[in-house]
Structures are given as C-alpha cells and as structure tokens.
Image (cartoon, helix red, strand yellow):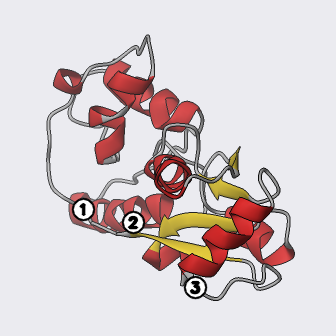
Amino acid sequence: VPFAAGGVADALPRLVGQKLSEKWGKPGVVDNKPGAAGNIGMETVARAAPDGYTLGLAPAGNLTVNPVLFRKLNFEARDFVPVTLLATSPNVLVVNPAVRARTLKDLVAYARSHPGELNFASPGSGSGAHLAGELLNLDAGIKTVHVPYNGMATAPTDLLGGQVQMMFGGISTVL
C-alpha cells in the first residue's frame, strides 16, 4: 500500500487481503510504504519478485499523473499488470468550522482577503487531493498553502483540531 496505515487506501487492501488469506489458506501481509505521493510503495511493488505473491494498490494518479509530475521514477506503468478496479471515490472539499465560510463562494472570498493564511491537507505532493487544491487556487485566483501528509489517516484529525483549515479527501475518509 503506497500510503500510511489508517486511511481508506489502507483499509480496502486489508479487507481484500483477509479474504484472500482465507481463500488460499495462507497468511497475507499488508505492507505500508508511504511517501513521495505513493512513489515509494509503487517502486517496491515494481521491484518485487514476479512470483505472483505481491499485489499492490495502484491509485490511478500514481500511474498516470506522477510520471508527468516527477522527473525520475523507478517504475513505469508497464511494470504492473492490472487485476481489478478495487474502488472509486470522489474527492470532496471539507473546511474546519472555525473558518467563517459556509459555501465555496464564502471560502473563496475569505481566501482572497487573507492570501496565504488558509492551508489544505493532502496525502502527499502530486496526489489527487493536492492537485485539487492547486486547481482551486488557480481557478479561483487564491493562494492557499499545501500541507502534505504521508496519507490521509491523520489529516481529518488535524482538520478538526484546526492545524489545517481545509482538505480535499475521498468522501469515505471525510465522512
């Protein structure tokens, strides 16, 4: 799993791993390799022995966006063989209640009048959530500060605690 333990990207592989362990009668191990927007975990899977015993969670961005964002990756999309689509989850924007914005229009107006004061969490530089925040900055003509995490497990807690003011996250994570 190319992200830290505790988020949806960790929970789904654990559920699948448990079912595969039961079916095959052999224990499975979920190995979290966070960092570099998932690139460390993706490289680990790409370099694993091609013996059929290593499965990797490959978020679409790791295979489609990261090759454009990062100059040198130690893997390519062709290093992987797709098995199944595990899940899809739209990103949604959530904001700490202390930010006096109840609509996106309110949030943009606040950010324009307070440039650089708002920050947003993501599971890492180059992640879909990071790019969503940067797209909001560009489209709305605002400046918010990106705060990358090694996954989304702790970001909601930091959002609620006020360490970050907003985040884009998968709907299941933010719910």
User: Secondary structure beneath disc 2?
Assistant: helix
Along the line of sight, the residue nearer the viewer: 133 or 115: 115
Q: Quadrant of the C terminus?
A: bottom right
Say which residue label 3 marks. Answer: 103
Say which residue label 1 marks. Answer: 86
Q: Which mark is residue 123?
A: none
Pointers 3 and 1 in contact (C-beta within 8 Å): no
Instruction: Please report whichever mark, 3 or 2, sits nearer to the chain's N-terminal start.
Output: 2
Instruction: Please report whichever mark, 1 or 2, sits nearer to the chain's N-terminal start.
Output: 2
User: Secondary structure beneath disc 3?
Assistant: loop
Pointers 1 and 2 in contact (C-beta within 8 Å): yes
Q: Horizontal placement of 54 versus 129: left or right? A: left
Q: How many marks?
A: 3
Percent position of residue 11, x then y: 47, 66
Q: Nearer the viewer, mark 3 or mark 2?
A: 3
Quarter of the image holding residue 104? bottom right
**Residue flagged by tag 2: what amino acid is it?**
Leu
Along the line of sight, the residue nearer the viewer: 31 or 7: 7
**Residue flagged by tag 3: what amino acid is it?**
Thr
Say which residue label 2 marks. Answer: 12
In the rendered view, tell whether residue 134 sits above or below residue 91: above
User: Secondary structure beneath disc 1?
Assistant: loop
Percent position of residue 115, x then y: 77, 53
Pointer 2 local density, CA inside 10 Å: few below 14, some 14–19, many at least 20: some
